[in-house]
């Protein structure tokens, strides 16, 4: 029996209040009996609609919106009005709506947050709340929080410092936790830490909703974060805390500081690592070269690049390599050229991957010298994989792996068409943003999208299901392998290194089971392992169906 099989539910709200509570509201789907018993008869048009009819109406409205931002505003309003219907629509139209509720549209929404603002969602904790963060967190109305996504707004997608406007990101991510993995919405808490902003446009914007002061830095910032993390543990002891879109300098540091002390992870680093590893494992099935024999060149050495390399190294070690052997298979090129040991002023997160090599400035020379099996673009620089670069890869490798992961589409290192065309159809290609299928040389290629949404919702669900106390690298490896295993031979035959997004709930359930299994095996879970773990995971998954109140 799933937790949603019984649709009867006792509620205390009545009348207009009920219609204004998005978690309980069913709109025109309230039955005659409910309308009578709950004092809402006459407050709705007479005809009782099915959820299917409501979906039809929503989709008609949605498609009539003239642009993506209007679609975002429309879906946000639906979320605020009728949560069940919102998730029904989102789950049934995942491929179409993911670019609206998440990147790229959510980025634009964040940029204009103060202007399109209708109604608050989630929690804002500001630098003015120092000394009383615990009390502020206690204002959150839902007692059982399973996942918190928190940002300080300093590096929102590729858009930089958006201050308190970054709130769209935790909200969007948590919508995906529910839509992709069935994490119940009542267990999701989006938080924005408003520590100020350096964005002068925002500071000068009279409609900006955050604190128009410079950011907290140094010790003051660290103390603020520490108070926050400690308060979260006290108030929501079973929640996993996901750090999101913090600046590089803080993201790596905070992850190192807290990962062994609290149940936390950073999706930009670890989630990206796992989803890319899964793509490489699938690509290895196509090329016939096992992961531990791959040589990977990263173009870009930020949170994504380093996170991916760390995950690949851990996976290669699982396959038998020693750490230094695995690390010697990961090379980095950043804006200053090849990342080598003798380079002065190298940032600390790049140092472990600095190779003993002469400096080399340009990508083509690096490829010719290193002869990678795979190039992974995580630089945010569009069109870095030019015709020359891709044909060089095709010249040195029979099936070159080309992952152009920079988002949004306009930042991608190359398009899918370019990747296939300029390698004579031999590239194993994946991208960060979606590309349509490509017809080339009488064949159809379906590019895979290395979307983090394949990983983090399933990881969160697995942590909740096992009540895990920590999120470990081993869990991310298990998640990546579960995702790769969910990629079928049919997917691979089309050139797709990930399963289609429409199968995401099923895939997330497998990922969550794999993650929970690690928690039980490593004694990190909050109780004994259920006899049928997969069933236990699936039973906890939310379904957007209306409950009967009467
Ligand atoms: P970041 O700002 O932390 O890192 C960017 C890196 O690129 C820096 O090391 C910088 O030195 C380097 N760089 C800049 N210009 C370069 C150039 N011309 N040549 C080589 N390197 C250059 O950003 P990040 O979080 O690491 O994200 C990078 C990109 O990856 C973004 O576009 C992001 O959208 C994308 N990303 C994709 C996924 C995914 O597909 N699942 C996940 C996370 C990030």
Image: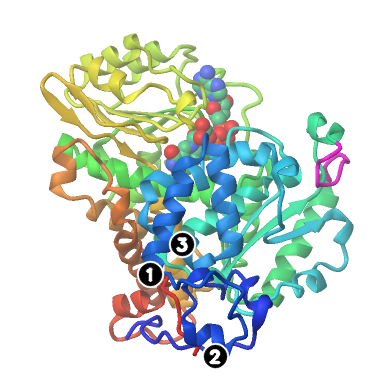
- For marks 3 and 2 on the same chain, the one whose residue lies earlier in the sequence: 2
Q: Is residue 185 visible?
A: yes
Residue at (80, 50) in percent of width and height: 221
Quadrant of the drawing holding the N terminus = bottom left
Is 51 displayed left or right of 492 in the figure? Answer: right
* Span colored in magenta: 206-216
Q: Is residue 475 visible?
A: no
Q: What element carries label 3?
A: helix
Residue toward you, 167 or 492? 167
212 in magenta: yes
Mark 1 lies on residue: 518
Q: How many labels does the image show?
A: 3
- For marks 1 and 2 on the same chain, the one whose residue lies earlier in the sequence: 2
Separation of disc 1 and disc 2 at Cα? 37 Å
Dot 3 and dot 2 residues touching (CB under 8 Å): no
Residue toward you, 241 or 135? 135
Mark 2 lies on residue: 10
């Amino acid at each position: 029996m799933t937790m949603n099989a019984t649709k009867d539910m006792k509620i205390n709200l009545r009348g207009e209040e009920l219609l204004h509570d998005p978690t309980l509201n069913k709109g025109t789907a309230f039955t005659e009996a409910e309308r009578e018993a709950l004092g809402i008869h006459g407050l709705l048009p007479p005809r009782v609609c099915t959820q299917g009819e409501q979906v039809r109406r929503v989709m008609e409205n949605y498609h009539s919106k003239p642009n993506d931002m209007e679609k975002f505003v429309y879906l946000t309003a639906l979320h605020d009005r009728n949560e069940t219907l919102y998730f029904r629509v989102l789950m049934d139209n995942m491929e179409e709506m993911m670019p609206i509720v998440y990147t790229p549209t959510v980025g634009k929404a964040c940029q204009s947050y103060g202007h399109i603002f209708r109604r608050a969602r989630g929690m804002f904790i500001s630098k003015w709340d120092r000394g009383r963060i615990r009390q502020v967190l206690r204002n959150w109305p839902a007692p059982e929080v399973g996942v918190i996504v928190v940002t300080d707004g300093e590096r929102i997608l590729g858009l930089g410092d958006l201050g308190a406007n970054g709130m769209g990101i935790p909200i969007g991510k948590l919508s995906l936790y529910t839509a992709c993995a069935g994490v119940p919405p009542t267990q999701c808490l989006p938080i924005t830490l408003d520590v100020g902003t350096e964005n002068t446009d925002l500071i000068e914007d009279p409609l900006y909703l955050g604190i128009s002061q410079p950011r907290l830095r140094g010790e003051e910032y660290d103390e603020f974060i520490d108070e926050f993390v400690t308060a979260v543990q006290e108030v929501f002891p079973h929640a996993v805390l996901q750090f999101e879109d913090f600046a590089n300098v803080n993201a790596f540091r905070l992850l190192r500081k807290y990962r062994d002390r609290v149940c936390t992870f950073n999706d930009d680093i670890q989630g990206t690592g796992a989803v890319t590893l899964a793509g490489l494992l699938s690509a290895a099935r196509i090329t016939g070269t096992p992961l531990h024999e791959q040589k990977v060149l990263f173009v870009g050495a930020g949170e994504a690049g380093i996170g991916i390399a760390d995950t690949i190294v851990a996976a290669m070690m699982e396959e038998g390599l020693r750490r230094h052997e695995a690390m010697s298979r990961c090379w980095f090129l950043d804006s200053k050229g090849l990342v080598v040991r003798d380079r002065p002023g190298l940032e600390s997160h790049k140092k472990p991957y600095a190779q003993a090599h002469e400096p080399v400035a340009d990508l083509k020379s690096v490829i010719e010298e290193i002869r990678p099996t795979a190039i992974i673009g995580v630089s945010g620089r569009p069109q870095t994989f030019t015709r020359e670069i891709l044909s060089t890869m095709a010249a040195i490798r029979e099936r070159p792996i080309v992952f152009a992961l920079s988002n949004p589409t306009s930042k991608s290192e190359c398009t899918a068409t370019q990747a296939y065309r300029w390698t004579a159809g031999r590239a194993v290609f994946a991208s960060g943003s979606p590309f349509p299928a490509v017809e080339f040389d009488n064949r159809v290629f379906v590019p895979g999208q290395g979307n983090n949404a394949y990983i983090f919702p399933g990881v969160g669900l697995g942590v909740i299901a096992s009540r895990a106390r920590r999120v470990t690298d081993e869990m991310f490896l298990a998640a990546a392998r579960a995702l790769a295993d969910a990629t079928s031979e049919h997917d691979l035959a089309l050139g797709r290194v990930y399963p289609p997004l429409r199968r995401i709930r099923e895939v997330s359930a497998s990922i969550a089971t794999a993650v929970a299994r690690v928690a039980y095996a490593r004694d990190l879970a909050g109780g004994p392992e259920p006899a049928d773990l997969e069933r236990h995971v699936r039973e906890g998954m939310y379904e957007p169906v209306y409950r009967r109140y009467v």
